[in-house]
Image: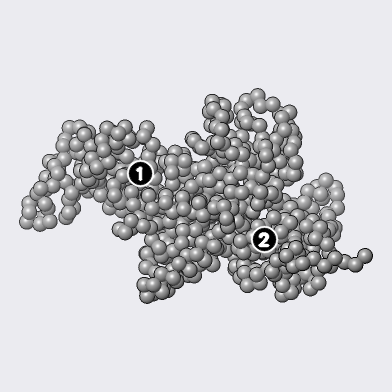
Amino acid sequence: MAEVEFPAILKGRKPDLDEGVFYELARLYKQLGIRDLVGEWFAEDAAARDAARVERGLKPVQGGRRVVLDPVDVLLVAHTLLVGEENALITTISKAIAKRLPVAVRRYMKLPEQEPVRDTSRYMQVQRSFQRLSNLTSPFLGLSGHRRPAQEYFDIVDATNPEEAQRRVARGLRLSNLLIEASLRVLPEQYRAAWDGTVCIDATALRVYGKRGSPRGLNKPGFDRDLTLSPESWAYWYYRDGDHGEPSDGKRPMDPQSKFGGEAHFAVQAGPVLANGRTSEDFPKLVASMTLNAPGYSPGEAAATLLASLADRGHPAGEVVSDRLYFPMAKPDVLQRPARALGYEPVHSIPRAQLGLRGNYKGMLFIDGNLYSPGMPKHLYDISIRHAKREISDAEYQALIAKRTPYLVKLKQSADEHGRMRFSCPALGKYPSVRCPIRELAKTSAAPNVRWNLPITQTGDQPAGAICEQASVTIDFADDDIARYWQKYQYMSPEWIAHYNGPRNCVEGANGHVKEDIYNRLDQPGLRRMRGYGKQLIAIALMVSAANIRAVRNYLEKRAARAVEQAIDITQPARRARRLNSSLQDHLPDLDKPAWTPGRPKVS
């Protein structure tokens, strides 16, 4: 029977894979050492496997299945497809390798110039490549693929060495952030240099593929272990309120809008609101690092991992902005001290329960995350509480914030490597902001810059301390309240609002960009059908990296179009001075020891 000739419209033939994109990604992978790193991990696991066999009296593994497709080459093909606004399903990757690779790319991947196998053969080879990567980066091996009883899941978790599970998760996080780093390096250097290291951290829910999830109440005492869990047994239900997870006491009611999946934590490049009411346009706002947890698990540790990954890749440390899920609700040893140890300056809102006067430190009043003179009038203590209760308007609140400002103690020396800061009384120095009866001001001839119409401090409300007796006092982050709540900017002042709202807008925009429904589609679980934590982590990282590259492309195109319209120089953005890193050595987070691994019980 003669072969039927289909018309072109029915052949479904797509053009060859973009050779230029493939080779540029290959160059970036080489620059970042991704292939060498994955090779080292395979060698480590092979050596550990052989050592375990020898201990049991067996011979080391000899030979094995021939590797036809290098897993890193498969990543390159998947990455290229995503940058080209296609999907990276195993079917799509295998068909691209079988039918769409240019001859030069086939040579690069050490494949014959003519495809000798069927699509199904390439499909299995691509699937095995992702499984090999998953074995490097998944905490518990043998879990994904099908639904299983909860007891079987817990048996596998209990039989796994926790250190091994932690090591594999650390690998996955490192690989995923290197894939994201490749997208950051697509941006020309002059625009990368315009970013001073300021980031905003936020979490977003990502559903996993499938109609059903695991039964709710997995963390409750007495959970029925005969119940069947999802193939994505590491994932859980995402709740919109609180810490986004279900507490172990089971008191939170079921949320009809909850999703079954993971919680991705992103650190997005950001900057403050400028005088024109917009954030800086000198650089695009890209996702700079990511982690993937089950909802509600260890958000503080996840944020510390994001910052540690940025430092590990050589990025500058600036301000770090977040909602209350991270700062200030995390424990100081979990996030605040590690963040400052890496050189970051937290900017965050404060829950209503923690507003107002929180203590007296060496005579200084600790109110709303700032230190004030003990002579500040008492009616200014609780203005944030009154505003939260809607007892005063926004305009009245800002007027009272301005009245507070002169009473701020002066920061004479920023935190040193041990976290020690020096402050002085606002009534001292050449340019005092208040007059204080305790510290009688020198005569005008000795202090010519004194303005005699300054606010006068009030005595008697709070006891005077070292701040009233010494030229300066030292405060460090050993105290939990100081470590948790202290901020450089006066809380809710115009400066604080600019440095908080700007980055928050940046992270919301970035979340919307990576999850939009037409091109990036990160929130469509059908495009991430691979099962298992390691595969999901890699798939999300590839999609975020491709979304970043698309954002860079859009940014440069808009900048070029604006340059034509306005005849501006597009090659020299305004440069900001980089901030110097400081270090609290005892609190530097360890990227090789992630705080959360799937299967670990949640502690409420």
Please state the horizontal and vertical placement of residue 18, each as a whole percent of the image: 65, 70
Please state the horizontal and vertical placement of residue 508, each as a whole percent of the image: 46, 50
Q: Which of the two residues, 506 or 297, is positioned nearer the viewer here?
A: 506
| Residue labelled with disc 1 | 486
For mark 2, does the 10 Å Cα neighbourhood hold few (<14), some (14 to 19), or many (20 or more) residues?
many
What residue is drawn where x is 18% and y is 49%?
Answer: 433
Question: From the viewer's perspective, is 119 left or right of 28?
Answer: right
- Which quadrant would residue 151 be assigned to in this image? top right
What residue is drawn where x is 58% and y is 60%?
Answer: 546
| Image quarter in which the N terminus is found | bottom right
What residue is drawn where x is 65% and y is 57%?
Answer: 87
The label number, if any, that marks residue 116 in the structure image: none
Q: Amino acid at mark 2?
A: Ala
Q: Which of the two residues, 36 or 535, is positioned nearer the viewer here?
A: 535
- In this rendering, does residue 196 appear at all? yes
| Residue labelled with disc 2 | 78
- Which quadrant would residue 78 be assigned to in this image? bottom right
For mark 1, does the 10 Å Cα neighbourhood hold few (<14), some (14 to 19), or many (20 or more) residues?
many
Closer to the eye: label 2 or 1: 2
- Mark 2 to mark 1 CA distance (whole Å): 45 Å
Q: Amino acid at mark 1?
A: Trp
